[in-house]
Amino acid sequence: MYKYDEVDHRLLRERVEQFRDQTRRYLVGELSEDEFRPLRLMNGLYIQRHAPMFRIAIPYGHLASRQLRRLARIARTYDKGYGHFTTRQNMQFNWPALERVPDILTELAEVEMHSIQTSGNCVRNTTTDVFAGVAADELIDGRAYCEIIRQWSTLHPEFAYLPRKFKIAVSGSVEDRAATLVHDIGLHVVKNDAGEVGFRVIVGGGLGRTPMVGKVIREFLPTRHLLTYLDAILRVYNRFGRRDNKFKARIKILVQALTAEGFAAKVEDEWAHLKDGPATLRDEDIAHYAGFFSDPAYETLAASPPELTDALARDPAFARWVARNTHAHKQPGYRSVVLSLKKTGVPPGDITAEQMDAAADWADRYGFGELRVSHEQNLILPDIRERDLFDVWQLARAHGFATPNVGLLTDIICCPGGDFCSLANARSIPVAEAIQRTFDDLDYLFDLGDIDCNFSGCMNACGHHHIGNIGILGVDKNGEEWYQITLGGSQGNHTAIGKVIGPSFAQADVPLAFERIMALYVEQRLAGERFIETVRRIGLEPFKERVYAKSH
Amino acid sequence: MQNLIKNNAVTEDAWRLIRADDESYGAAEDVILPLAIWLATDTSARSGQTAVWLAPDTDLAVLAPQLARLPLVAIDFPAFTDGRGYSLARLLRERYGYQGELRAIGDVQRDQLAYLSQVGFTVFAIRGDRPAEAALGGLHDFSDQYQSTVRQPEPLFKRRTSR
């Protein structure tokens, strides 16, 4: 993991002091509500239904065990004993008092954490593949570049007041697990024919009101040019992105207006002046950051040891958990464990302070003291020996972490919705729970197989409903909560925006619609065909007919 | 009152900001004119100094040939959340080599000063209802920055690995 040096610590302390003073000036009336809002947002502080909502950055989803313990302490001391992982791999607290936020920041700074740019119209937390550095299918470990981007984007003087928020995602593996095609900038770490490492640069993807899949504006950018090229993109956006209408202010609208070719030409013109300038990365710079992400001291182990295979043969529930909640590791004898935060009855992504402490302990005891947060809102132990999987499973079960549903229909990506968020049109948590209860038969759930179900309580799309194989969007109809269902969305290498199947549903009717959709899938699927593949093959019509059929 | 910060201190000077195209001024006054008026003005006929202020959507190319004879350029911030002026300032300094005074005008407050200074502004006309004395500290919110900036072209990552 990246380790702060003296300058990182000093800048963070200065940022905390700056925010402490801004909060003080707001509380004594020297800053108006309108003036304080952009300043507090840039530090992750929203004013929500019940209290401020405070968002803490987890850079590219990496957490050290001591950091997770500190989050647990903050949850206990300043909140109600739990926190919520977001789809940007961050953590949110829903109940802190405004006056105490500067103290939380001081606590965070002690463990190299902060809430810089977790909201506001600035460059947000860079996200990446949750299995970066450990995945069996990884081509290039992109984490050094994530950290380089994190530092470049942190307190960037030129780009603090952009037209709108700006999100960057990095992927270095065969399967894109970072949703790079629906980000303002997506970067694929690739090698060219000469074997040089570089980036494929994708711009203008995004969800929200106007969902769009990003466009490639450069097939290969040598790594040394990363920051000058990012500066060029951001400068074009900062100068020419729309500022008259917040719903048209994301970079995707600018890219659409100029066309991808037109936008790329503007970036290349700008870059011609910046290329090879002072922000060009030298080999030693990249090596400096890569040094923080070298492999931990893996043991030389045989794959599939008897401790694992015996337990798999003996215990079908364990086998189920291994099949769903562990992920192939590049190192023989290891797997990555996904601790599911999608237990029925618990809001998706919520985690208690006790669970945080427990997971931190397992990371120390069984791994190398590191954890990851996924954009699917689960917690990951990246390096677990296969021979320890059974022990970890039992511990995880005892702490409510082992629902074997990762990647299944009930592993719902979900925003906090109307229960917490003042932007939401509808509640999401109770509806997500109703769906989880409807599909509580594990055999059926497993038979349905891989299904991404994404749920947003409003069109801001924090729950990424557009790229769910099945998506739900909460809408407001004359003050009532209704739910629109989309089908055919997907993330990853075949990113697609889902299509609405028809009129929206009352809350009570959503589970029935889901049942009908799944029943049709089971009838129609070919052998081995996943839900999304069936939807692509047969189209939306048969699903519409089934869902909206009059009951007999 | 001008409410200016310059050279790390609150100060006053003789420049008068002409906001509206039809605002009148004397030939001996030092004035900062709107771009359209400045382009149409024969400055040799004036005894006072003449400068220009730019809206954030200005195309700098129209100004470039005459930059060298400008003693002062001001960039307007209609709202402090409008960040276009930061990029304009960098372009003036780094692309067009402008060496003179660069003044931030409009909704300029304490919390923007550190960044404004990094992108090349040298004078800050603090919004009229805010005392410049109280804003002065904002210049020193940060002792360093990660990026390559006008004030410190060497980014932090290079200074780290070159130690």
Image (spheres, coloured by chain):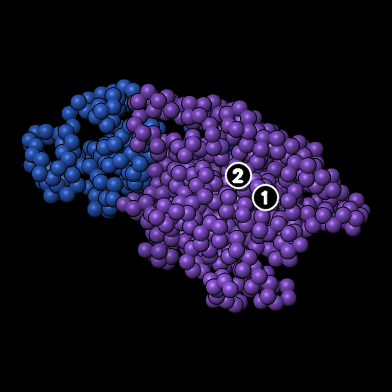
Chain colours: A purple, B blue
Figure quadrant of residue B10: top left
Q: How many marks?
A: 2
Q: Secondary structure at mark 2?
A: strand
Figure quadrant of residue A189: bottom right
Q: Choose mark 1 or mark 2, whichever is in front.
A: 1
A540 shown above or below A341:
below
User: The disc numbered 1 marks a residue on which chain?
Assistant: A
Residue in view at x 65 percent, y 33 percent: A72
User: The disc numbered 2 marks a residue on which chain?
Assistant: A
Q: Nearer the viewer, residue A364 or A323?
A: A323
A262 shown above or below A385:
below
Q: Give the CA distance from mark 1 to mark 2.
A: 16 Å
Q: Nearer the viewer, residue A202 or A490?
A: A490
For marks 1 and 2, the one nearer the N-term is 2
Percent x, y of residue B77: 29, 41
Residue in view at x 56 percent, y 67 percent: A487
Residue in view at x 57 percent, y 29 percent: A78
A473 shown above or below A64:
below
Percent x, y of residue B55: 25, 46
Q: Secondary structure at mark 1?
A: loop
Left or right: residue A197 compared with residue A54:
right
Identify the residue under disc 1.
A344
Identify the residue under disc 2.
A85
Q: Quadrant of the C terminus of chain A?
A: bottom right
Residue A504 visible to the viewer: yes
Q: Nearer the viewer, residue A120 or A503?
A: A503
Percent x, y of residue A30: 34, 26
